[in-house]
């Protein structure tokens, strides 16, 4: 395509989205995860465990495109830190279910709060357009989740 458009986005729009996500990720790593001794990947696992009912280790890995060994390492680290528990599924012993410990849930709440405060400071610059932006993000997520 000669106009630089990719899937309805211009190349510049795609780049801008990645740059925005990159800025948020770097700020989160520097300001939130390091303080709580949790890596970004471990945070993703914890977030996925909370948001997915009956989260399985393989399901979490597949969602984030982590190899089985990579997700095992992250879960093992979170288990050693007392943030996540593992339990074999009663109906299918090959499935390992994950759950946040009480401590893990509190820590995730604290990290969500930190991230929310930092993101709100950025999004305040949108002023009256913030609700429209939030709606647009939700619409984009709906389309992406639908496949």
Image: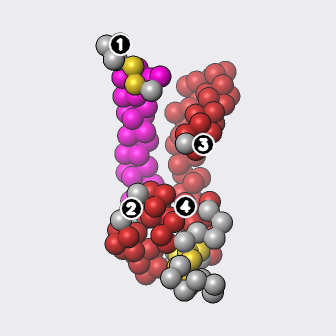
- Horizontal side, residue 80 vs residue 2: left or right: right
User: What secondary structure is marked by label 2?
Assistant: loop
**Which mark, residue 66?**
2
Q: Earlier in the sequence, mark 3 or mark 2?
A: 2
* Circle 4 or circle 3, nearest the eye: 3
Question: Is residue 61 rendered magenta in the image?
Answer: no
Q: Which residues are magenta?
A: 8-35
Is the magenta region chiefly helix, strand or loop? Answer: helix
Q: Is residue 47 above or below residue 78?
A: above
Q: CA distance from mark 2 to mark 4?
A: 13 Å
Q: Earlier in the sequence, mark 2 or mark 4?
A: 4
Q: Sequence-wise, which precedes: disc 1 or disc 3?
A: 1
The quarter of the image holding the C terminus is: top right
11 within the magenta span: yes
Say whether marks 1 and 2 touch (CB < 8 Å). Answer: no
Label 1 to label 4, Cα distance in Å? 38 Å
Q: Which residue is labeled 3 in the image?
A: 146
Residue at position x 41%, y 78% from top?
Answer: 76
Label placed on residue 48: 4
Q: Position of residue 13 (x, y in %)?
A: 42, 23
| Real-space Cα separation, disc 4 to disc 3, in angstroms | 18 Å
Name the secondary structure under disc 1: loop
Observer-nearest of 3 and 122? 3
Q: Which mark is residue 3?
A: 1
Query: Which residue appears at 56% of the width and 75% of the height?
Result: 98
Q: Visible in this render: residue 126? A: yes
Q: Does residue 40 appear to the left or right of 115 in the view shown?
A: left
Quarter of the image with the N terminus is top left
Q: Residue at 38%, 62% (x, y): give it.
A: 66
């Amino acid at each position: 395509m000669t106009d630089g458009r990719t899937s309805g986005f211009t190349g510049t729009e795609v780049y801008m989205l990645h740059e925005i996500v990159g800025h948020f990720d770097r700020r989160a790593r520097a300001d939130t995860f390091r303080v709580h001794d949790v890596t970004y990947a471990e945070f993703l696992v914890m977030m996925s465990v909370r948001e997915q009912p009956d989260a399985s280790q393989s399901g979490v890995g597949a969602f984030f495109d982590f190899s089985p060994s990579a997700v095992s390492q992250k879960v093992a680290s979170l288990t050693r830190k007392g943030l996540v528990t593992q339990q074999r599924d009663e109906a299918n012993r090959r499935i390992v279910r994950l759950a946040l410990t009480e401590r893990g849930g509190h820590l995730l709440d604290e990290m969500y709060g930190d991230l929310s405060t930092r993101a709100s400071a950025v999004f305040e610059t949108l002023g009256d357009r913030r609700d429209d932006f939030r709606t647009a993000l939700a619409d984009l997520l709906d389309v992406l989740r639908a496949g």
